[in-house]
Amino acid sequence: MVEERSFLTKFFNGLNIFILLLITLLCIYPVWYMLVVSFSDKAAVAAGQVFFWPKEFTLSAYAMILEDAQFFKSFSISVTRVFLGAITTFVVVVLMAYPLSKTSKDFRPRNVIMWTLIFAMLFNGGLIPWYMTMKSLGMTNNIWGLVLGGGLPVFNVILVMNFFRNLPKELEESAIMDGAGPWRILLQIILPLSKPVLATVLVFTIVYHWNEFFQALVLMTKNDNYPLQTYIRQVTVIADASKLDAESAKRLTNTSNQTLNAAKIFISMIPLLIIYPFFQKYFIKGITLGSVKG
């Protein structure tokens, strides 16, 4: 009986390892495929001959990127957007989550604001009213439209709020007895203890601002103002070449180069691949402790 249980334990452990390895490979392969395609010959990729290893290894795609001034301009716009967006979202989320972590007795408008946030998270006014509002505020064709267009992620507010609520109340009570005010409590006690959830929110914010492309399609009327993901999206869209003039058809031929597009996509993934390892140790803890309580 003991040997049978030992065999079943080893079998299920081996099965779990196999399944986890399979899931890992499924997650890694798309990134690997983009890298392989970027190093392959354009004709081999178009013929569907590239799967796991580069076919007719070449660096021509990366050489073409070095000559693409718009790629680097869009890259810099995305970096600026991430930097400004991370700071703006961090400040707004913390300042909103801290009072909402109090009870309605300590902060009377708490329930009204909370229900308003929940309603806004579940429903919205639609794309056209959003665009009209952004245009009336002068948020078109400038970086602040991209930064402030999604500057208050309600999910992040709820995550940070619940993390604050899980912190020991005695710490804040002791600080109040020592004469500390709300700002000092927030900056010197709450925030230093909230590194896991703050790191998690920072990762969410960076990923959102780096990968988001639709807002720029709506708010930007000039291609020069496109962030990187919007630029890549535009050059990978397949158009009907029969309706284009000679110059546009030539441009389409260049931008439809799968090898070149793969190189651009892979380069756009590098910043996120670099960032994740530094925040990994905080990520799971921040999600767990900041989860919604009943």
Image: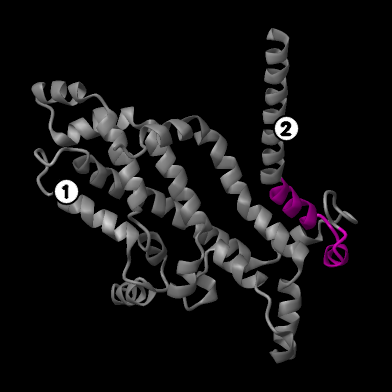
- Residue 19 is situated, as x and y percent measured from the top left of the image, at 69, 35
Q: Of residues 239 and 114, which is closer to you in this image?
A: 114
User: In the picture shown, does residue 84 fall above or below 24?
Assistant: below
Q: Dot 2 lies on which element?
A: helix
Q: Mark 2 points at which residue?
A: 18
User: In the picture shown, does residue 29 fall above or below 127?
Assistant: above
Rendered image quadrant of residue 238: bottom right
The label on residue 111 is: 1
Residue 233 is covered by the magenta coloring? no
Res. 165 in view:
yes
Q: Does 67 sit left or right of 273 as displayed?
A: right
Q: Of residues 128 and 179, which is closer to you in this image?
A: 128
Instruction: Kindly check if marks 1 and 2 are in contact, taking CB atoms under 8 A apart as contact.
Output: no
* Residues shaded magenta: 29-49
Q: Which residue is drawn at 32% across and 64% down?
A: 123
Indicate the amino acid at tag 2. Answer: Phe
- Residue 55 is situated, as x and y percent measured from the top left of the image, at 88, 55
Q: Does 186 sit left or right of 12 as displayed?
A: left
Res. 64 in view:
no
